[in-house]
Image (tube, rainbow, N blue to C red):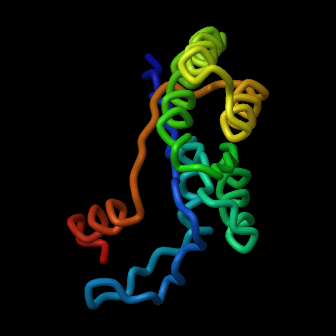
Amino acid sequence: MEQARQLQDLVLIGDANPHAPEYVWDGKAIGIDWKAECAGLKKQGIKVYGVHCGGSSSSRPFYQDVASTTGGQYLPLDSLQTMTDTFAALCLREADATGAKLKEYKERVTKRDGRLTADSQRMFSLLESTTVTIRRSVVLTGTQVLAARSAAGGG
């Protein structure tokens, strides 16, 4: 009998380009090659959502590349005040392939704030415009990734 496979997403939130693999953290080179990591995630069927905070044009290509390489989505975020709504909307979208929960949340945010900000409008538009195939989301900060690698003996 074939075993069911659980699909996952990873949400990468940041505002800058990644450090080079030879970057030293806590006395050790981190050794993380983001292109190789993305290839590995794609092989595992894990999509990465690149949430790009602040809109710096120099780091935009990194978040776009991570998302497109893994089949995820690039989500620009100009205001950190929208972060909670962005993450909640992403999770609701992934939990309900029909889009009903996302639509309901958009209506609640609109009612709560009296209107959608430009940032919120863009985020909801992007999330409403793509097909959902994911069932579980995981969020890690860069520091958590480094700590997990260190604890696992990976550097």
x 58%, y 48%: residue: 48
**Residue farthest toward the left in the current orientation of the protein:** 151
Please state, as top left, top right, bottom left or bottom right, where the C terminus lies in the image.
Answer: bottom left
81 relative to 138 in the view: left or right: right
Image height of 97 relative to 137, above or below: above
Q: Position of residue 140 (x, y in %)?
A: 39, 52
Q: Position of residue 126 (x, y in %)?
A: 74, 34
x 23%, y 71%: residue: 153
Q: Nearer the viewer, residue 84 or 135?
A: 84
Q: Position of residue 36 (x, y in %)?
A: 58, 68
x 45%, y 87%: residue: 23
60 relative to 37 in the view: left or right: right
x 68%, y 50%: residue: 76
Q: Quadrant of residue 127?
A: top right
127 relative to 111 in the view: left or right: right
Please state, as top left, top right, bottom left or bottom right, where the N terminus lies in the image.
Answer: top left
Image height of 5 relative to 55, above or below: above
Image height of 28 relative to 76, above or below: below
Disc count in the image?
0
**Residue farthest toward the front in the current orientation of the protein:** 114
Q: Position of residue 138 (x, y in %)?
A: 42, 41
Image height of 132 relative to 103, above or below: below
